[in-house]
Amino acid sequence: MEEDLDEIASGRKGYFEVVDSFFKPFDKHLRELEEKKDEIRELIQEETDIVCDRCGSKMVVKVDRDGKYLACSNLSCKNTLAFPQNGVIEETRICPQCGGRLILRRGKFGKFYGCENYPSCRYTESITTGIKCPECGIGELVERKSKRKRIFYACSNYPNCDFILWDKPVNKPCPECGYPLIVKSRRKTASYKCPRCNAQITEVSESLN
């Protein structure tokens, strides 16, 4: 590409000629991948021994931009589940409004649970971290996405509580000031600190990462 740019600058090649020579094969390749997307999707999904509690088929691991999740291998069944944490599959959740099942859904602000009877029932629940909000002590911290796709953590008791964190919370009190949680830095090198007193914490159990 650098040589082509030099050729354009010297007038030996035209701009549109160079652009066409790159984008036409690239566009053809994208079209071929689009036609094979279902085949590719089947190849990359991983089958599990987990049985779909809705139709009895095996669940498979799928991946989207929000991470891994479980989906039924039966294409006519739309059942999905949150990816098991520490090998534990959470129990089926029941919609308190209509009695239907709550299934994992994905929206523009991240994952959430929605009633299977949507749109007749619009009940939803946030997926929480299980960590109590240190501000109000009532809600739990849930993972959200900003309009710019940046992950942050907010209180599930919003709008009554507007507490947020931009770093991942860890359910461990600060050894310096006793604040009920610490946060994990977004940097490549793992580091932890207290969001209140900014104390740097070096020793954190791996199970809390």
Image (cartoon, rainbow, N blue to C red):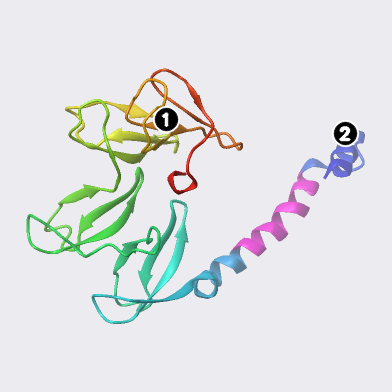
The mark found on residue 15 in the picture is none
Residue 85 belongs to magenta span? no
Q: Residues within 10 Å of mark 2 (few under 14, many from 20)?
A: few
Q: SS at mark 2?
A: helix
Q: Residue furthest bottom?
A: 56
Q: Magenta stretch: dominant SS?
A: helix
Q: Residue at x 26, y 32 (%)?
A: 133
Q: Residue at x 90, y 37 (%)?
A: 11
Residue at mark 2:
9
The image quarter containing residue 173 is top left
Q: SS at mark 1?
A: loop
Q: Amino acid at mark 2?
A: Ala
Residue 99 percent across, percent down from the top left? 8, 63
Q: Residue at x 61, y 36 (%)?
A: 189
Residue 76 percent across, percent down from the top left? 31, 77
User: Count the marks: how many?
Assistant: 2
Q: Residue at x 79, y 41 (%)?
A: 15
Check contact, mark 1 vs mark 2: CB within 8 A. no
Q: Nearer the viewer, residue 61 or 133?
A: 133
| Quadrant housing the N terminus | top right
The mark found on residue 166 in the picture is 1
Residue 13 against residue 118 in the figure, above or below:
above
The image quarter containing residue 120 is bottom left
Q: Nearer the viewer, residue 170 or 74?
A: 170
- Identify the mark nearer the N-term, 1 or 2: 2
Q: Amino acid at mark 1?
A: Trp
The image quarter containing residue 84 is bottom left
Which residues, given as a range, are shown in magenta?
A: 16-30
Residue 196 against residue 117 in the figure, above or below:
above
Q: Residue furthest top?
A: 197
Residue 18 belongs to magenta span? yes
